[in-house]
Image: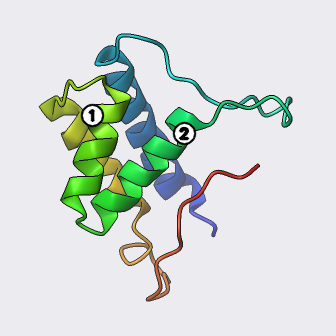
Amino acid sequence: MTWGAGRGLEIAHANQDFLAVLMMSRPVPLLLSEVGAPNNRTVHDERAILSMISAMQTDDTPTARDEIASLTAGRVEAAVIRTGLALAALLDPMKSAGGSKERPALCVVH
């Protein structure tokens, strides 16, 4: 999928906003994978983030709520929900120009 400069920058900005809010609501740093070390990857937080965004896109509130609680050690703050929903809406292929009717599944690439 090619987003172009305008849409790509909008998604990057929303992603940065979401991750900044998420990191401020956590008692510990995010555990993310290292691109250069594919055999030594910690993907728990990445999976939780992708699961949360996917659940928000499909209005699966219980899963989104559980993933937010998992990511924030139980602190479900409005700013995390607001920025997560904004990011999920931007990533929705149904809203992108030329998007297909089928939603792609979000997953961690190993």
Residue under label 2, please give it: 46
**Residue type highlighted by circle 2:** Glu
Q: Residue at x 85, y 29 (%)?
A: 37
Q: Residue at x 44, y 43 (%)?
A: 49
In this view, 105 is above or below 64: below
65 sits left or right of 71 in the view: left
Tell me whether circle 1 and circle 2 mark residues in contact (CB < 8 Å).
Answer: no
Q: Residue furthest top?
A: 27
102 sits left or right of 86 in the view: right
Front residue (pair 41, 98): 41
Residue 89 in view of the camera:
no
Front residue (pair 21, 61): 61
**Residue type highlighted by circle 1:** Ala
Q: Quadrant of residue 15?
A: top left
**Which dot marks residue 101?**
none
Image quarter hosting the N terminus:
bottom right
Front residue (pair 10, 41): 41
60 sits left or right of 43 in the view: left
Question: Considering the numbered disc 1 on the image, is that residue within a helix, a strand or a loop?
Answer: helix
Residue under label 1, please give it: 69
Q: Quadrant of residue 60?
A: bottom left
- The x, y position of residue 43, in whole percent, is 62, 36
- Structural distance between the alpha carbons of marks 1 and 2: 14 Å
User: Label 2 crowding class (10 Å Cα cut-off): few <14, some 14-19, many 20+?
Assistant: some
User: Label 1 crowding class (10 Å Cα cut-off): few <14, some 14-19, many 20+?
Assistant: some
- The x, y position of residue 62, in whole percent, is 21, 55
100 sits left or right of 88 in the view: right
Front residue (pair 8, 51): 51
- The x, y position of residue 48, in whole percent, is 45, 43
- The x, y position of residue 19, in whole percent, is 41, 30
Q: Residue at x 25, y 34 (%)?
A: 80
